[in-house]
Amino acid sequence: MQEKKLAIIATKGTLDWAYPPFILASTAAALGYEVQIFFTFYGLQLCKKKLNLKVSSLGNPGMPMPMAMDKWFPVALQALPGMEGVMTAMMKKKMASKGVASLEDLRQLSQEAEVKMIACQMTVDLFDMNLGDFIDGIEFAGEADIAMYI
């Protein structure tokens, strides 16, 4: 019988894009899959000890808006200072009201389930990131090394 494996590539560093990799990884690990997440470019934000992720409705036309705001709230007003904070607070409140685990909890659950988390060394170097900012257990690898993980 062939071993079940799942490889996920996380490239986004916003709150709404942070959930799918960890939900998929923790679920697959619970189902017996060997799981790896490769974090590259802005996805590296998900590996930092201190998560300060935001969400924006700008450039995200599929985002459901409360009170049908997507129908009457002009896009230009979404660019006003402070709107990103409002949208982030609304998203966090909505997730909490629906019982969705926090991102920190999902990440911890993934680590406990032995999901292999790999940070893109090239991106770390490109953005002059401090290795001390990353959570414990992260491995660093270049794109050429990824084939050995998958």
Image: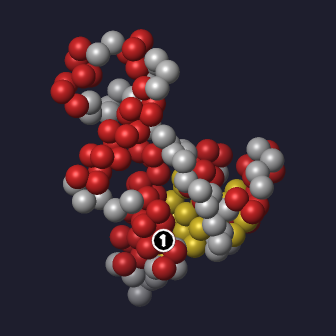
Q: Which residue is the extreme one toward the bottom?
A: 1
- Numbered-mark total: 1
Asked whether 14 or 80 is in front, the reply is 80
Residue at the image position 22 percent from the left and 31 percent from the top:
66
- Position of residue 107 relative to residue 29, above or below, is above
Q: Please state, as top left, top right, bottom left or bottom right, where the N terminus lies in the image.
A: bottom left
- Position of residue 118 relative to residue 122, above or below, is below
Q: How is the image coloured?
A: secondary structure
- Position of residue 116 relative to residue 133, above or below, is below
Asked whether 55 or 32 is in front, the reply is 55
Q: Position of residue 46 (x, y in %)?
A: 56, 55
Which type of secondary structure does the marked residue at label 1 adopt?
A: helix
Q: Is residue 59 visible?
A: no
Q: Residues within 10 Å of mark 1 (few under 14, many from 20)?
A: some
- Position of residue 136 relative to residue 66, above or below, is below
Residue at the image position 42 percent from the left and 67 percent from the top:
105
Q: Please state, as top left, top right, bottom left or bottom right, where the C terminus lies in the image.
A: bottom right
Q: Position of residue 128 (x, y in %)?
A: 81, 47
Residue at the image position 46 percent from the left and 18 percent from the top:
79
Residue at the image position 27 percent from the left and 46 percent from the top:
94
Residue annotated with mark 1: 108
Q: Position of residue 55 (x, y in %)?
A: 44, 38
Asked whether 8 or 14 is in front, the reply is 14
Q: Is residue 129 visible?
A: yes
Q: Which residue is the extreme one toward the left?
A: 67
Q: In the image, 109: left or right of 138?
A: left
* Amino acid type, residue under disc 1 in the picture: Gln
Asked whether 25 or 53 is in front, the reply is 53
